[in-house]
Image (tube, grey):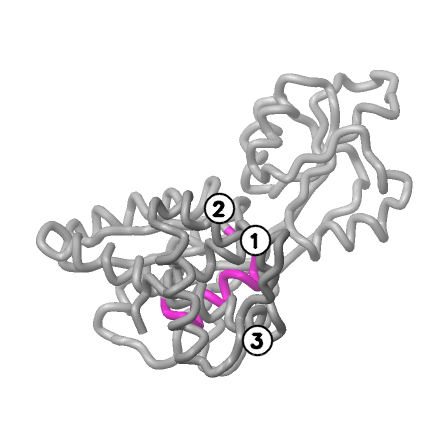
């Protein structure tokens, strides 16, 4: 199937309008209509309900949406790898939550480029469910995540246990205010466990879905919050941050996930490098 059909379908679904999709794609409305009609004929189902107000996805359209997205991603991945083939004979695509990129996977990539100079690396951040889906689609080669539950066909290997600790940038004995608590979203598991442990912080004055960038706020404002221990260990030892005594800790296992069926010769040096990087954290 022509990838342009899938791409056009996704733009119509996004905009909810054939007219707006045509403007966004810089083509005529009749071309958009012809592409969607051709796609519907291929699938044997109507994908949109047309009306004067726009176009809404049918049940079949909602089902096809994730497949269309996968098709476009696979095509983009193929284009990227082919375009890099002359300069970089090897390519790897890696995904992980933001928290695991900072202070861990970024260092690993630097080491990987030294170990395999010809390799090109594509990195992406996302939630575990989205990363697992991309592994299935084939647009990710390796994902590193907390508590994965991927479907069959993927191998899960434990790397290390991530410890989240409470740290504070306020001075010892400073009077606490209701606004001095920083809630950083470290993923759905952490948010749920945190809410159970600290119901008093269910509606904090400051909530950041920015992962490691929350540390910048902590360092420039007197407040406290949870961060991966590996990220704040040196700051604690230097006295920049302090870890309150007897504070609760949250521990989550970290795994690397990759296809069961793979090119062992190409994958194994990369996996060994990840294992070594994880060992250094301990």
The residue tagged 1 is 16
Residue range highlighted in magenta: 126-138
Q: Earlier in the sequence, mark 3 or mark 2?
A: 2
The residue tagged 2 is 20
Between 238 and 40, the one lying in front of the other is 40
The residue tagged 3 is 60
Residue 95 counted in the magenta span:
no
Residue 160 screen position, x and y as percent: 53, 59
Residue that appears at 58% across and 69% down: 62
Disc 2 crowd rating (10 Å Cα; few below 14, some 14-19, many 20+) is some
Taking the image as shown, residue 115 lies to the left or right of residue 130, namely left
Gap in Å between the C-alphas at discs 1 and 2? 8 Å
> Residue 254 sits in which quadrant?
bottom right
Residue that appears at 58% across and 58% down: 55
Q: Which of marks 3 and 2 is in front?
A: 2
Residues under numbered marks 1 and 2 in contact, where contact means CB atoms less than 8 Å apart: yes
The correct choice, above or below, for 57 with respect to 100 in the image is below
Gap in Å between the C-alphas at discs 3 and 2? 22 Å
């Amino acid at each position: 199937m022509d990838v342009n059909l899938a791409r056009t379908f996704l733009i119509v679904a996004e905009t909810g309008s054939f007219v707006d999709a045509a403007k966004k794609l810089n083509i005529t409305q009749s071309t958009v209509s012809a592409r969607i009609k051709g796609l519907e004929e291929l699938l044997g189902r109507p994908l949109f309900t047309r009306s004067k107000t726009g176009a809404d996805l049918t049940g079949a359209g909602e089902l096809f949406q994730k497949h269309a997205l996968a098709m476009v991603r696979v095509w983009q991945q193929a284009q990227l790898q082919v375009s890099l083939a002359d300069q970089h004979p090897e390519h790897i695509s890696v995904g992980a939550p933001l928290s695991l990129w900072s202070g861990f996977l970024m260092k690993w990539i630097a080491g990987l480029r030294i170990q395999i100079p010809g390799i090109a690396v594509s990195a992406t951040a996302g939630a575990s469910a989205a990363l697992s889906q991309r592994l299935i689609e084939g647009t990710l080669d390796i994902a590193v995540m907390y508590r994965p539950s991927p479907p069959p066909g993927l191998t899960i290997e434990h790397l290390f246990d991530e410890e989240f600790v409470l740290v504070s940038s306020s001075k010892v004995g400073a009077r606490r205010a209701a606004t001095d608590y920083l809630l950083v979203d470290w993923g759905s598991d952490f948010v749920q466990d945190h809410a159970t442990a600290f119901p008093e912080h269910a509606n904090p004055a400051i909530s950041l879905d920015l992962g490691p960038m929350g540390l910048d706020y902590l360092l420039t404002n007197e407040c406290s919050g949870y961060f991966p221990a590996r990220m704040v260990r040196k700051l604690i030892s230097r006295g920049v941050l302090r870890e309150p005594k007897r504070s609760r800790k949250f521990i989550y296992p970290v795994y690397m996930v990759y296809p069961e069926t793979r090119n062992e010769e190409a994958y194994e040096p990369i996996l060994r490098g990840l294992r070594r990087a994880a060992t250094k954290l301990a």
